Amino acid sequence: MNFIKTFLKLLFDPEAKVDLFKVSPRLYAIFKHQRLHAAWCGMLTVLLLFIILAGLYGPQDPTRNSILYLCWGLWWPSVILSLFLVGRMWCGVCPFPVAGNFLQSLNLSFNQKVPRLLQRKSTEIAVIFFMLIIWIEESTGMKQNPAATAYLLLAIFGGAFFCSVLFAKQAWCTYFCPLGKVMGIGASIAWLEFRPDHSKCKQCTTFACKRGTEQLPGCPIDLGAFKVTNNLECHLCGYCLQLCPHDSPQLNLRHPLYEIIIRKGKFISCTLLVPFLIGSQLARLLDQNIYDLMGLIERECSYEWLCQMGLYVIPLSIGFLLADAIINYSNFIFGVYDDGIMGRFSPMVPVFLPLAFAGELVSRLNYTVRNFAEFPATVGRQFGWQFLEQLTFTIPEWVYPVYGISILFLSELAGLYVLRIFVTKDFEGMISTWRYRFLQMSFFSLFAVYIYLISMGWHIPYLNVLFFFQ
Ligand code: SF4
Ligand code: SF4
Ligand code: SF4
């Protein structure tokens, strides 16, 4: 009963928070002692090594190599799903920085500071890396190619390792990791946040959460709990709990839209990434569910990957430009995108952000669900376990609309809620009714485009949107 009351309070009061460390001292102890983190991290490191080795040296036939499903069907969709619930907590157990951390613990690092120019441009660099990954992934059929998948993971692992050799702490994670930047933006709509109790930090003289103590180094990403003001950077690893002498850090359950309402799309990573994510999903759905664009491109290019990448730029750019135009035109209609205190911001980015991540989740889950039945048989073929090969079942088609419509509908509600708060509270009296209605309509039309494109892949004729026009 108490739980329901708390949940409702959080849902209806964007400023309400519940400190889970206070509610559950056991949870506090788990984070403080870090043993569970170490166990997870160890397990995931072994899994990562397996995926890389099996990708490089295992069978290249996609029906005989389970790493494709492990990577694209389980790992990436789980990470995206976890963003909505626990923010960047994946980063707290991520195996990519493990080798670099080990090297640094042996003092085998140049421990340099990242040059200022790179620090300033790091968001753009990470976003470009991410766009490159999506572009290569979609245009070269990476999800069907174990070696290419392993090379991608090796590239991220290599980036983290190289940065650890050159720079102090996990500089890759702080500045360049494309996955980290995307997760930071997605984590803005998480139910959880890690924050300090500023009243305690004000009296602090050691700042041990950042600087460390004689026995322990400070925050692995050189942030420190006292500097955490949003979900963009903190890994929610809880490592600083053992460093803080005043028990300042808190793990809060909160309203998931609170942060984007406050920030109003003020960071360039959001303004670039949200339209890119939406655009890449439109291109992907158009390809998978209607035109078989990739099939056309592959035949046109005689399966030459460089040519495929070149041609795939066209649907990707069309998708990006369309999403960017919708967001910018909506900003223009909104009419307020600059003020003396915040500077320039993009009010429609937070409105579209939940849809962008919900679309990403749904399109990734489609791969997960579509290939789930084949996974045991693939493992069986890979390791010669015949009993798994004989395990056959089918996923009923109704599953796709159930999660697809639910997730997209929730994101639609979230976007409309943010828009309503902007119009009725934050910018009260500044946006006329016709502008408000227009924005609702433009938001709804993009949602309708999603539903249309997704419904074309459901193979359930009476749920296909075109059915209504027949
Ligand atoms: S930022 Fe990237 S490399 Fe670092 S922990 Fe997160 S996902 Fe792993
Ligand atoms: S979190 Fe703890 S160690 Fe860090 S500044 Fe606040 S009180 Fe000091
Ligand atoms: S501030 Fe604390 S919880 Fe956040 S990344 Fe640093 S050590 Fe981990």
Image (tube, rainbow, N blue to C red):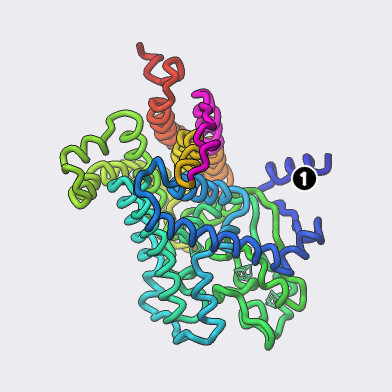
Residue at point 75% right, 56% down? 20
**Residue 89 visible in image:** yes
Question: In terms of secondary structure, what is the magenta stretch mainly?
Answer: helix
Tell which of 326 and 392 is nearer to you.
Answer: 392
- The picture places residue 324, in percent across and down from the top left corner, at 34, 46
Tell which of 161 and 331 is nearer to you.
Answer: 161
Question: Quadrant location of the N terminus?
Answer: top right
- The picture places residue 271, in percent across and down from the top left corner, at 40, 54
Residue at point 36% right, 65% down? 125
Name the residue tied to disc 1: 6
Residue 394 painted magenta: yes
Q: Which residues are magenta?
A: 384-411
Instruction: Name the outermost residue toward the top.
Output: 470
Question: How would you rate the neighbour count of disc 1 (Cα within 10 Å): few for under 14, some for 14-19, many for 20 or more?
Answer: some
Q: What amino acid type is highlighted by mark number 1?
A: Thr
Secondary structure beneath label 1? helix
